[in-house]
């Protein structure tokens, strides 16, 4: 465990049990969400690659327009 995480856990350990429980739930939910994203990206890798290939082909054929962002004044 790195120093930052050790420090965070030490701070959380000083909180009342109910707040510790809430923070633990938030951490576990965040970890589960990250795993979910990793799984979804892994399953869609071939689709993303195909979309990128098609976009590059469209650009090569001159079928795309450059993005123009407004300038800040």
Image (cartoon, rainbow, N blue to C red):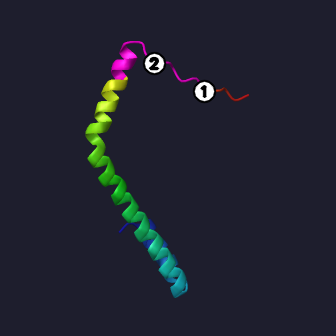
Disc 2, SS? loop
State the SS at label 1: loop
Q: Marks 1 and 2: which is nearer the front?
A: 2
- Does the segment drawn in magenta span residue 28? no
Identity of the residue drawn at 51% across and 20% down: 66
Q: Quadrant of the N terminus?
A: bottom left
In the displayed structure, would residue 68 be above or below residue 8? above
- Quick check: 33 above or below 52? below
x and y percentages locating residue 73 in the rendered image: 73, 28
Question: Residue 51 location, x and y as percent?
Answer: 33, 31
Label ID, residue 59: none
Magenta region: 56-69
Q: Quadrant of residue 35?
A: bottom left
The tally of labels here is 2
Packing grade of label 1 (10 A; few <14, some 14-19, many >=20) is few
State left or right for residue 47 relative to residue 67: left
State the mark number for residue 64.
2
The furthest residue to the top: 62
Where on the picture, by quarter, is residue 72? top right
Q: In this orientation, which residue lies closer to the viewer: 47 or 4?
A: 47
In the rendering, at what x and y percent does residue 62 appear? 42, 12
Q: CA distance from mark 1 to mark 2?
A: 16 Å
Residue at 45% across, 18% down: 64
- Residue under numbered circle 1: 69
Q: Residue at point 35% right, 58% down?
A: 36
Q: Is residue 61 magenta?
A: yes
């Amino acid at each position: 465990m790195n120093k930052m995480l050790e420090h965070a856990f030490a701070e959380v350990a000083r909180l009342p049990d109910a707040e510790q429980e809430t923070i633990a739930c938030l951490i576990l939910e965040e970890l589960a969400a990250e795993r979910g994203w990793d799984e979804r990206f892994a399953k869609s890798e071939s689709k993303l690659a195909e979309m990128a290939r098609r976009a590059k082909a469209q650009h090569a054929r001159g079928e795309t327009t450059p993005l123009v962002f407004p300038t800040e004044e």
